Image (spheres, grey):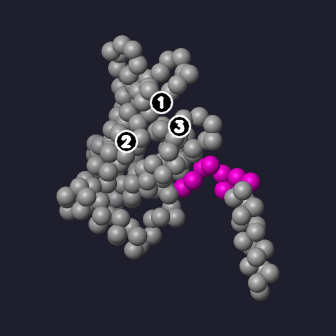
Amino acid sequence: MQLGLTRRLSGLLLLLALGGGGPSVAAEAQLSGDEQARYLAELKRLYLTNDERKALLTHSNVLLDTYALRAAYQVGKVQRSDLRYQLSVSAPGELLVREESRAEKGTALTVRNSKLSVFGLDPYIRYDCPPSGIVCVLNNPADGSPWLQVLRDHQGAEELAKSLSFLIRNLQKN
């Protein structure tokens, strides 16, 4: 029995060491019952509200601002720009994403809005933080395409994916 457990553990460690777990990660391991209740209670306490959706939306926006891709981090890039996101709920079951891009020099501001209908989606947000580069990319739950880019910080991307996953689940309730 000990040999079997040792083989399984060795296989798991080998898989992780070789990158078999891959840089793409999902927030689903952290979305279970008791932890969900604790997480939501903590967010409601932190943002002084009894509304789960408001707490999740506020927390997601705070994380997006904290881990925003700023021009100052883009050393060596020819055209650096700030990239910021803001989330809001535009209609029942619809998440509105506002993307702002501002060039490092100048006043030009590019704004792009997109809507994500959450009904029928897998709520688990997957993200990728490649070893080279300065960004983590959160994937669109609708089609798996790149959706949001934030500063390369594994813990920040993980927390943002978790918050967005809970937010999507919350939006799917209505």
Asked whether the beta carbons under mark 2 and mark 1 sit within 8 Å of each other, the answer is no
- Callout 3 environment at 10 Å: few (<14), some (14 to 19), or many (20+)? many
Q: Is residue 6 left or right of residue 151?
A: right
Element marked by disc 1: helix
Measured Cα–Cα span from mark 3 to mark 2:
13 Å
Residue 52: x %, y % from top left: 27, 60
Q: Outermost residue, top direction?
A: 106
Q: Amino acid at mark 3?
A: Val
Query: Which numbered disc flags the more N-terminal residue, 1 or 3?
Result: 1
Q: Is residue 165 visible?
A: no
Q: What residue is shown with label 3?
A: 135
In the rendered view, tell whether residue 32 sits above or below residue 76: below
Task: Say the numbered circle drawn on residue 66.
Answer: 2
Measured Cα–Cα span from mark 1 to mark 3:
10 Å
Element marked by disc 3: strand
Measured Cα–Cα span from mark 2 to mark 1:
13 Å
Kindly identify the residue that appears in the image at 74 percent across and 54 percent down. Answer: 18
| Quadrant of image for the C terminus | bottom left
Q: Where, by quadrant of the figure, is residue 107 drawn? A: top left
Q: Where, by quadrant of the figure, is residue 40 drawn? A: bottom left
In the rendered view, tell whether residue 83 sits above or below residue 147: above
Q: Is residue 118 visible?
A: yes
Magenta stretch bounds: 18-26
Q: What residue is shown with label 1?
A: 73
Q: Nearer the viewer, residue 82 or 90?
A: 82
